[in-house]
Image (cartoon, rainbow, N blue to C red):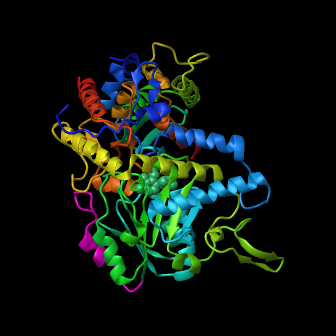
Amino acid sequence: MDDTKTLNLNVRKDFPILSKKILKKKDLIYFDTAASAQKPNTVIDETNDFYKNHYSNVSRGVHTLSVESTFRYEDARKKVQKFLNARSENEIIFTKSATEGINLVAQTFYEKFMQKGDEVILSLIEHHSNLIPWFFLRDKYGVVLKFANIQPSGEIDIDHFNSLFTNKTKIVSLTHLSNVFGTELNEKAISICKDKNIPILLDGCQSAAHLKIDVQKLGCDFFVFSGHKTYGPAGIGVLYGTENLLSEMPPYQGGGGMIGDVSLEGASYAELPAKYEAGTPPLVEAHGLGIAIDYMNKIGLDNIIEHENEITKYAFNKLNEIDFIEIHGGDNKRNSIISFNVKNVHSHEVSSFLDVEGIAIRAGHHCCQPLMKHLGVNSTARLSFGVYNSLEEVDKFVIALHKCKEFFNK
Amino acid sequence: MNDLINDLYQEIILDHGREPRNFGECEPHNKSADGHNPLCGDNLKLTFLLNDQNIIEDIKFTGEGCAISLASASLMTEKLKGKKIEVAEEIFKDFTNLVSGSDEDLKVLNEEDSLYALKGVGGFPMRVKCATMAWHAFKQALKD
Ligand SMILES: Cc1ncc(COP(=O)(O)O)c(C=O)c1O
């Protein structure tokens, strides 16, 4: 290992799964946080405690347990509001995932503000979650989709992006941090939307735990993320939207909890945020997400970011020195994610080989098939880092990679 | 080296993965199907010629994929060429059992078969789909 200053967060012990031995003997090195983050003890214990001591439905009754559950659910909303620096709790909608958040916006924004022939701008690096909901609009309603090109660095080609706007452009939806390249969105993309007065949705799945998010400073109109990628439970997601837009758009799903008053002739709808939360929500998961946010705050997001940046730079430089490794994208504005290929070895082989060494990495198309096509590969291997990773793990990984190359080229 | 890895990547698998046999398109052919693994993006196209005695006269594939999926497709074409359909279907059943980790009750395959080399896939449940992609394309082609 080099003499680089290491900000050792010393949090590995907080994550019980990290003491698991892979194949009974290998220490687990978890480099797949971008797919889903591991959970700290506090999240596991607090969700357990919710079921054991406080559980009931939310906002439905007046008894003690209902009050305790509702308090925890709404307290989680406050934590998310602070985490994103939203203006009000009314701007925080709990969903089941980022995916559901994007579907919600695509559907209800269309219903209120769009018609056949109107245009949506996306980009080539989007996750399928930020493509298919818009494909639905194209297929069902004749909406036109346009895709911004990317540069070899992995960043969106801003000039091309700018050239896609017409007087039919109604909304833009872009990833805030690419799950393949780890590159952060150029802020210019957002300011272009602001200048043209076009709402922009940021897919914050990969940025939420790895960048400091301030939706007001960012100036985005919508922001989505998933709890499971931010050290919280799966089954809970967040949609941030400005109160203006969320008030104007129609409800997404109908059901209990989202109504004002119902008669057989019709219904009025609840105020924000309940308007978009039909049915019993994932209340324990929401609480778990709140605890995960507490956990990140306790370590300090600045510390987390510094730590991950250091590991990312270290790993990037190490990989860059190896002649049989091809890294996708550049090193500018890269955070916590590195996709690469081992020359002449399929990413599946790399992943299976590393697996028996105790190293978990992702192999595949990362739900970005259009991007893979653009890169001219059908899959890549991906490293992604979280609070619990260390430079030593990167060193072990590099040694294993050399062994892997040797094995397959013997 | 780890046993699991050595079991998974036997020499014959690495060899067929690097240099798949019967790679290309069968001309003429009267059966074809595409295989696709949506989890990773690997894909292949299988073509074969079934004669009037229900014998697979020739069989080829093209596509891109990992060593396991290419080797499995390559070994499959070698095994099925010249076989009657009924036999091929028995082999299909045996093979899917084999790579899912159960080699009891095999009817037609035995340890002498080159296909047996893929048994190691059983130690990697997430890779079973790689090994069966070509075989499912074969089944699909029979249905169409
Ligand atoms: C950039 C990006 N967007 C969207 C998603 C979808 O997240 P989820 O499946 O939690 O809804 C992911 C997760 O893989 C992602 O990385």
Identified at 47% across, 35% down, the residue is: A15
Residue farthest to the bottom, as pictured = A167
Residue A156 is inside the magenta segment: yes
Chain part drawn in magenta: A150-168
Tell me the quarter of the image containing the C terminus of chain A: top left
Residue at the right extreme of this rendering: A264
Query: Is residue B12 rendered magenta in the image?
Result: no
Q: Position of residue A258 (x, y in %)?
A: 69, 69
Q: Quadrant of the N terminus of chain A?
A: top left
| Vertical relation: B8 (above or below) A66 | above
Q: Is residue B131 visible?
A: no
Taking the image as drawn, is residue A98 in sight? Answer: yes
Residue plotted at (23% across, 28% down)? A402
| Magenta segment, prevailing SS (helix, strand or loop) | loop
The one of B112 and B144 positioned closer to us in this rendering: B112
Is A67 in front, or is B29?
Answer: A67
Task: Please name the residue shown 54% across and 52% down the image.
Answer: A290
Quadrant position of residue A342: top left
x, y percentage for residue B49?
A: 46, 39
Q: Measured from the top left, where is residue A206 in percent x and y?
A: 40, 54
Please tell me in which quadrant of the rendered image residue B108 appears.
Answer: top right
In this picture, is A378 found above or below B115? below
In this rendering, position of residue A56 left or right of residue B10: right
- Viewer-proximal residue among B117 and A280: A280
Residue at point 32%, 20% (across, down): B11
| Residue found at the very far top of the displayed protein | B112
